[in-house]
Amino acid sequence: MDEYKATDGVNIAHSGKTSVTVFRYGEQSANHKRQIEEKWKIEDVDFNVWGLRKEDFLPPSDLQTS
């Protein structure tokens, strides 16, 4: 994460990069991997946005944590 900016006294990353490597398993899977990279940037940050409810931020019901 990069480009931290203070928003209402809280430092929030406004850009960053996410990288992942996906491997294929099974028959004929040798040398089958893909690297995916996503660059992102947040234009605007705000707190206490009117109309958003606590329920809008619940994780999916099938999410498993260890």
Image: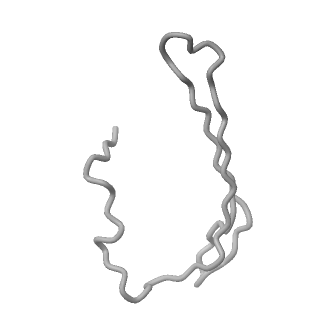
Q: How many marks?
A: 0
| 64 vs 5: above or below | above
Q: Outermost residue toward the bottom?
A: 50
The answer to whether residue 15 is above or below residue 26 is below
Q: Look at the image and tell me in which quarter the N terminus lies.
A: bottom right
Q: Quadrant of the C terminus?
A: top left
Q: Quadrant of residue 12?
A: bottom right
Q: Residue at x 31, y 54 (%)?
A: 60
Image quadrant assignment for residue 41: bottom right
Question: Which residue is the extreme one toward the front?
Answer: 28
**Residue shown at the point (62%, 21%) measured from the top left:** 32
Q: Relative to 22, is 48 above or below?
A: below
User: In the rendered view, would you say 40 is above or below 18?
Assistant: below
- Horizontal and vertical percent for residue 15? 69, 64
Residue depicted at x 50% and y 18%: 25
Instruction: Name the image colouring.
Output: one colour
Image location of residue 56, percent across then percent down = 33, 71
